[in-house]
Image (cartoon, rainbow, N blue to C red):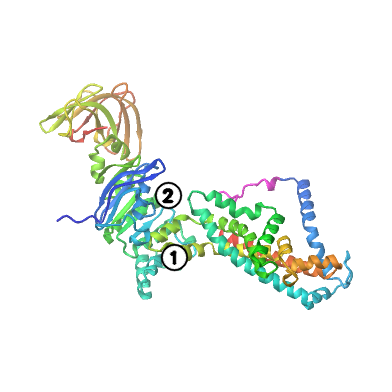
């Protein structure tokens, strides 16, 4: 028996006048999911989150919570929690009272309020700051208070709207870890909005890629990175090299592609395509190895080119290679072990067939 | 604030103004406040005639004010009117300000114009309108009519002050409160109102002050039974040159000063 989704959104649209902020979104959220809505700004990801929260009404479509239609239920009766980019703590209340707020509304008894708030404070490592005002805390501390407030009443789903967007890089990475930890420890269901693909990859159990008001692709971080289905996904999640080509068919467990710039390469099979289809070949920069001219390779895809740029990024060497007049391929190899190639030298690019992802537009 | 992240203060335009310009500015300031301040020394005069510079020193004029039954009665009338008008203008103005800041409904621009109307229309026209209107209702000359008239007059001031306070409030706090489980009413009363409490208090103080020394509307609406303090002062100066006015003026100036300082302090605190 498959578990019933805790939230399911069916054909949801949000239309302002003639502009659709969200179009025909359908997605299920399972209990324990960490679903990230990833997309560029203005793509509709926050609209979808707000629609789940109930603060933006759906123009059409349905929202079910545990199988019950909640489309018309106001936000305060949906039983969700929410965390915002700018914290949204109540400045006139202490940290304790901010966290106690949802409990007081639910008429939880005084002693229990005290116990739960203190537990939540421990959970976000703010023990001892209960009597401070939000203004006396740093941005990272304020966001931890907001997290505590969103989990203290054990809501069915916790919604997070770019919660780390206002913090600097170091703090952000620290809090990413804490949110991930919180999710794992509480077994909570989280819907998380971000435009940061690295954040999405590192935190989620599932990613929904959104652009131009539509959900484009849904999958695990691993699939989104290693097996994207569209060039848009490949371009948005991680760095990618794209080459135009024509699909020739599958043989011996691999597909064969004829590159527009000349040459045949083998790739991941795509039985859903017909021979002759226009496709894109996608290679991740770290999937490619570089060899000097004439050095032996075995069973790998091969292209030749000239080094046009070569720079040390710290962990990796980043090398740009022109394989023909139009195509530049970016290669990243671990700087500790990889050989360095001088500018303008000829090199061979080689990579494994299963790193060759075939995309449709 | 004109401070850089490292804490050094950058020179502002004011810092770079030359000395002669500063002297001119000081003179203009003196010209503006002198008429208000000139009554203060006169109020401590020991003569019943108004003269400047004053002679002697006594509290006689103050005693005259506090001992005069007509002065006390009109002071009480003004207090009652100002209190009632303030309560009504807050009750109407705070929700209107909230709607104007938060609502995206069509037609809010028109509502804004209507709310600001008492400021836009000349006071004398507004007062005449109220006079005719209250006469039709049969309540002209009553304390109630004064309260209602001043309440309408003060609403735009309340709205402006409260709007300024609300603009400082992050609207996501209200969204958060609702997602956390608070109903719309609960959000308004236990989240929004406390966050703008100091703005509301400031608006109330200013409303009280405006009503307390308002002359034009009160002139149209008051009767001999319902004379407010400014009307009583104004009519008394027409019959006799009464030195007690300087004592009352000094007290009014003091009241204004205290209210303004408290009001500004409240708004600073909120910002």
Q: CA distance from mark 2 to mark 1?
A: 35 Å
Q: Is residue A207 above or below residue A69?
A: above
Residue A168 got which mark? Answer: 2
Q: Could you tell whether A35 is left or right of B242 in the image?
A: left
Does any portion of residue A133 appear in the rendered image? no
Magenta-colored stretch includes residue B254: no
The crowd level at tag 2 (other Cα within 10 Å; few <14, some 14-19, many 20+) is: few
Disc 2 is placed on an element classified as loop
Front residue (pair A323, A246): A246
- The residue furthest left is A252
Q: Nearer the viewer, mark 2 or mark 1?
A: 1
**Residue A333 appears at what percent x and percent y?**
28, 36
Q: In the rendered view of the protein, which quadrant contains the N terminus of chain A?
A: bottom left
Residue B34 location, quadrant: bottom right
Q: Same chain for marks 2 and 1?
A: no
Query: Label 1, on which residue?
Result: B186
Query: Looking at the image, which residue is at 42% across and 51% down?
Result: A167
Residue A16 location, quadrant: top left
The secondary structure that dominates the magenta segment is loop
Query: Looking at the image, which residue is at 41% across and 58% down?
Result: B176
């Amino acid at each position: 028996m498959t578990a019933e989704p805790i939230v399911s959104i069916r054909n949801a649209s949000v239309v302002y006048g003639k502009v659709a902020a969200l179009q025909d979104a359908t997605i299920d959220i399972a209990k324990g999911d960490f679903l990230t809505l990833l997309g560029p700004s203005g793509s509709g990801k926050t609209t979808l989150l707000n629609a789940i929260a109930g603060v933006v009404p759906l123009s059409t479509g349905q929202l079910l919570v545990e199988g019950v239609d909640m489309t018309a239920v106001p936000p305060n009766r949906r039983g969700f929690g929410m965390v915002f980019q700018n914290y949204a703590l109540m400045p006139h209340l202490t940290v304790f009272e901010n966290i106690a707020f949802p409990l007081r509304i639910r008429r939880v008894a005084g002693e229990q309020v005290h116990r739960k708030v203190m537990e939540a404070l421990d959970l976000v490592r703010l023990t001892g700051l209960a009597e401070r005002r939000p203004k006396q805390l740093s941005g990272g501390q304020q966001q931890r208070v907001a997290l505590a407030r969103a989990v203290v009443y054990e809501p069915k789903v916790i919604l997070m709207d770019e919660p780390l967007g206002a913090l600097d890089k170091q703090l952000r990475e620290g809090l990413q870890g804490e949110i991930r930890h919180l999710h794992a420890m509480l077994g909570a269901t989280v819907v998380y909005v971000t435009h940061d693909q690295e954040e999405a990859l590192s935190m989620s159990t599932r990613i929904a890629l959104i652009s131009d008001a539509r959900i484009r692709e849904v999958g695990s971080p691993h699939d989104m990175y290693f097996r994207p289905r569209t060039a848009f996904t490949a371009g948005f999640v991680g760095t990618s090299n794209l080459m135009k080509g024509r699909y020739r068919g599958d043989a011996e467990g691999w597909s064969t592609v004829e590159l527009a710039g000349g040459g045949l390469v083998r790739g991941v099979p795509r039985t859903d395509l017909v021979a002759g289809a226009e496709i894109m070949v996608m290679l991740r920069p770290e999937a490619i190895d570089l060899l000097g001219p004439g050095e032996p390779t075995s069973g790998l895809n091969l292209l030749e080119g000239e080094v046009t740029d070569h720079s040390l990024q710290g962990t990796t060497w980043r090398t740009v290679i022109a394989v023909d007049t139009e195509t530049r391929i970016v290669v990243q190899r671990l700087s500790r072990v990889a050989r360095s190639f001088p500018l303008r030298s000829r090199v061979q690019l080689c990579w494994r067939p299963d790193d060759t992802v075939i995309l449709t537009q | 604030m004109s401070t850089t992240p490292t804490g050094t203060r950058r020179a502002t335009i004011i810092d770079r103004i030359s000395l002669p310009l500063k002297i001119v500015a000081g003179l203009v300031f003196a010209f503006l406040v002198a008429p208000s301040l000139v009554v203060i020394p006169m109020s401590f005069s020991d003569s019943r005639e108004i003269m400047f510079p004053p002679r002697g020193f006594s509290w006689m004029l103050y005693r005259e004010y506090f001992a005069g039954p007509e002065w006390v009665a009109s002071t009480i009338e003004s207090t009652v009117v100002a209190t009632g008008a303030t309560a009504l203008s807050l009750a109407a103005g705070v929700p209107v300000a909230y709607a104007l800041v938060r609502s995206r409904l069509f037609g809010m621009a028109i509502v804004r114009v209507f709310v600001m109307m008492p400021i836009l229309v000349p006071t004398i026209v507004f007062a005449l309108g109220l006079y005719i209107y209250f006469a039709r209702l049969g309540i002209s000359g009553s304390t109630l009519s004064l309260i209602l008239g001043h309440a309408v007059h003060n609403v735009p001031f309340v709205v402006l002050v409260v709007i300024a306070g609300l603009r400082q409030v992050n609207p996501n706090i209200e969204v958060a409160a609702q997602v956390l489980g608070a109903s719309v009413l609960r959000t308004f009363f236990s989240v929004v109102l406390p966050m703008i409490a100091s703005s509301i208090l400031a608006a109330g103080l200013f409303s009280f002050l405006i009503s307390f020394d308002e002359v034009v509307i009160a002139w149209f609406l008051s009767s001999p039974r319902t004379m407010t303090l400014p009307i009583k002062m104004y009519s008394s100066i027409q019959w006799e040159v009464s030195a007690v006015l300087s004592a009352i003026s000094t007290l009014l100036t003091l009241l204004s000063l205290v209210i303004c300082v408290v009001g500004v302090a409240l708004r600073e605190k909120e910002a």
